[in-house]
Amino acid sequence: MDPVQNPFSPGAGTPPPELAGRGELLEEARVMIGRALNGRSTQGMLMTGLRGVGKTVILNELMRIAEEQGALPLYIEATADSTLSELLASELKKLFFSLNRMAGTKEKVKKGLVVLRNFIGTVHVNIGDIGLDIEPFAGIADSGNIESDLSDLFECVAEAAKEKGKAVLLLVDEVQYLPKKELGALIMAFHRLQQRQLPFAVVGAGLPMLAGLAGKAKSYAERLFLFPNIDALGFEATKQAIESPFAGCGVKIERKAIEKVFAQSKGYPYFIQEWGYQIWNRADRKKISGDDVEKVRTKVEKRLDENFFHARLERLTAGEKDFLYGMAECGDCIRMADVSRALHCNVASLSKRRASLLAKGMIYSPRYGELAFTVPMFGRFMLRSRC
């Protein structure tokens, strides 16, 4: 069939043609945004899940929902080499300028811009001239203490939004990369906003270790946030994700074909998109069978190896790669002792590599003493790539 008309879209954060299996979560978030708009306190949300389950897709959908409901979304993505202050500064500048252009009184918006200028000065971020001729507000967001200053800044943001009848939705992707102090500052700032019932909501997404990191940063995080686990899709949701795009283009896919896609993808949304994409490009008729799925198996595996798996290896040292090979040889339940046996070395000699891989978000500890890959089916890839 015509590749130009292919409805499937494998990619990092690319919206799928059918966002299946996430309706309950999206409705929960929609209520949260609505409560913020009405000045009612609400828990935030920190979504957790493996790579490829669609966390970024959900954040993008929540941005759309926020705009649809009249809220103002702020989207940032944490990285290992950037600070929360740097990420927030330019986005908040744009938000304040947007509020400043709206009709009505602007006293709190102008105050917010000056407080942002104070904050920028303390964290040494250069985002250009704020450009308002107004006296500075000394003593607000200018202490150099990220916890105190971020709380002051977020209060001014929320008050400025409230002045315009708006609410702010802060969306933070890859939250696990925030240092403990910055994550604690974010949690503390949101806590103060909820105590004052200001129109500000927070939704974040990160790898499975995020819930533990948030609890270590601030003990009350577990009461302040919901921690929904974004998992692979079940069969019915997978069926919807693969069947609906085909049906929308007048193509029927047999149940046997869907069962094969589910068995191969394990319900992971990114993998489903890759399977759908390759099946469409390979099929020469408007009825997809199980045989059509089998015909693209090698192509799908090659594409996933090149585009999803292999790129993650390039950021690792030789020693870290060896550690992952050792994990791959251990099966599903992996312990450090198993890895040390697979690599024929003692546990102590592997501790630095383990810590480095945890910091890079390649592995996590699902339970005490256990290790797992943050990328689904990564162990299979490691064994294939070593052959």
Image (cartoon, grey):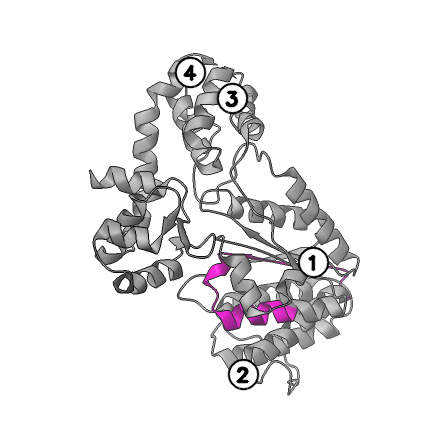
Q: Earlier in the sequence, mark 1 or mark 2?
A: 1
Residue type of the residue flagged with mark 3: Phe
Residue 58 x %, y % = 57, 45
Q: Earlier in the sequence, mark 3 or mark 2?
A: 2
From this viewpoint, is residue 25 visible? yes
Q: Is residue 100 left or right of residue 171?
A: right
Comparing labels 1 and 2, the label whose residue is closer to the camera: 1
Q: Is residue 190 left or right of residue 337?
A: right
- Residue located at (62% from left, 64% from top): 221
Magenta span has 350? no
Q: Which residue is mark 2?
A: 144
- Residue located at (75% from left, 69% from top): 195
Q: Earlier in the sequence, mark 4 or mark 3?
A: 3
CA distance for labels 1 and 4: 45 Å
What segment carries the magenta color?
163-189
Check whether the beta carbons of the residues at disc 1 and disc 2 lie within 8 A of each other: no
From this viewpoint, is residue 323 visible? no
Q: Which residue is mark 1?
A: 43
Residue nearest the observer in this picture, 51 or 213? 213
Q: Which residue is mark 3?
A: 246
Residue 290 is marked as 4
Residue type of the residue flagged with mark 2: Gly
Check whether the beta carbons of the residues at disc 4 and disc 2 lie within 8 A of each other: no
Q: Earlier in the sequence, mark 4 or mark 2?
A: 2
